[in-house]
């Protein structure tokens, strides 16, 4: 007797393949839905983090300022006086430092200040040091760390030309100005100062009147992006300073608002 081997009919094969396709399709659909949900959650989290960091940094510095230069409207919805997308104010969080000295030496990312420099750790942090004569003249660098016992100041980045013991420097925190503004989808933060064309090493107020034959010049000390995905940024004052920021990423949107009371205004 010859036994027939088991086999499937064409109908059974078609039904099996159809069921398999449906199962794979369902699994793939669940995977895509999960990925989309994850991406939306990630976008929402990133927007929240961006928005909070931007507002925290702005409010901390605006709170300390003694002068806001940008004219701010009293209300946010006056078409004749719309709220600006930038704010410009005097930096008020630093000590009033005005010192000159001669470097004792330097490395690629440090400079050893004069023997008369402060012995207090962190004293010069966040100030800008300018080489006013000698090796490396006209370079300006931000001090990000200072050790009082050794007089060593660490700068952001590296020197283009390393100063030496012939280099004279100046630290002048008298007139630093901060500007926050929307640049495309980014928020930029700048630190600027002003000087008369006849004496570029002496900083002056933003509205100082230069002597006859000279002009008031602006110098950019620092320029950085502090946030992204921004669609709108507005400032107004009534009487405290209001900040409203809107962000968007992958279809997710976020609106944040805060109020800032200037302690020194």
Image (tube, rainbow, N blue to C red):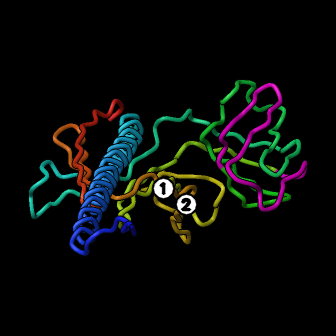
Q: Confirm whether residue 105 shows in the render.
A: yes
Q: Confirm whether residue 231 shows in the render.
A: no
Does the stretch in magenta take in 145?
yes
Q: Secondary structure at mark 2?
A: strand
Compared to residue 121, the image places residue 53 above or below, namely below
Q: Position of residue 169 (x, y in %)?
A: 76, 48
* Camera-nearest residue between 161 and 137: 161
Residue 103 falls left or right of residue 121: right
Residue 220: numbered disc? 2
Q: Which residues are magenta?
A: 142-167
- In the image, what residue occupies the spot 82% across and 40% down? 112
Does the stretch in magenta take in 22?
no
Residue 247 falls left or right of residue 113: left
- In the image, what residue occupies the spot 47% across and 57% down? 225
Q: Look at the numbered discs 2 and 1 and tell me whether their residues touch, using CB distance below 8 Å.
A: yes
Q: Residues within 10 Å of mark 1 (few under 14, many from 20)?
A: some
Compared to residue 4, the image places residue 70 above or below, namely above
Q: Position of residue 114 (x, y in %)?
A: 82, 37
- In the image, what residue occupies the spot 27% across and 58% down? 23
* Displayed quadrant of residue 133: bottom right
Residue 226: numbered disc? none
Q: Look at mark 1 in the image and give the residue it sits on.
A: 190
Q: Position of residue 247 (x, y in %)?
A: 28, 55
Cα separation, mark 2 vs mark 1, equals 7 Å
């Amino acid at each position: 007797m010859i036994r027939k081997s088991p086999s499937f009919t064409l109908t059974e094969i078609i039904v099996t393949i159809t069921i398999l396709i449906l199962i794979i399709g369902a699994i793939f659909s669940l995977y895509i839905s999960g990925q989309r949900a994850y991406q939306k959650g990630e976008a929402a989290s990133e927007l929240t983090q961006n928005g909070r960091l931007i507002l925290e940094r702005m409010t901390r510095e605006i709170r300390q300022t003694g002068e806001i230069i940008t004219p701010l409207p009293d209300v946010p919805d006056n078409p004749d006086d719309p709220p600006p997308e930038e704010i410009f104010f005097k930096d008020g969080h630093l000590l009033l430092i005005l010192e000159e000295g001669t470097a004792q030496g330097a490395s690629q990312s440090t400079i050893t200040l004069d023997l008369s420099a402060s012995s207090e750790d962190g004293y010069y942090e966040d100030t800008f040091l300018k080489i006013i004569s000698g090796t490396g003249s006209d370079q300006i660098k931000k001090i990000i760390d200072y050790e009082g016992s050794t007089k060593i100041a660490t700068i952001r980045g590296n020197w283009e030309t390393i100063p030496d013991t012939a280099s004279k420097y100046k630290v002048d925190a008298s007139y630093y100005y901060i500007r926050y503004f929307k640049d495309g989808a980014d928020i930029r933060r700048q630190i600027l100062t002003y000087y008369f064309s006849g004496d570029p090493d002496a900083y002056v107020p933003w509205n100082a009147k230069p002597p006859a034959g000279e002009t008031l010049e602006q110098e950019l000390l620092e320029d950085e992006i502090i946030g992204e995905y921004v669609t709108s940024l507005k400032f107004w004052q009534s009487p405290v300073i209001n900040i409203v920021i809107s962000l968007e990423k992958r279809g997710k949107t976020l609106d944040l608002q805060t109020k800032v009371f200037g302690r020194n205004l």
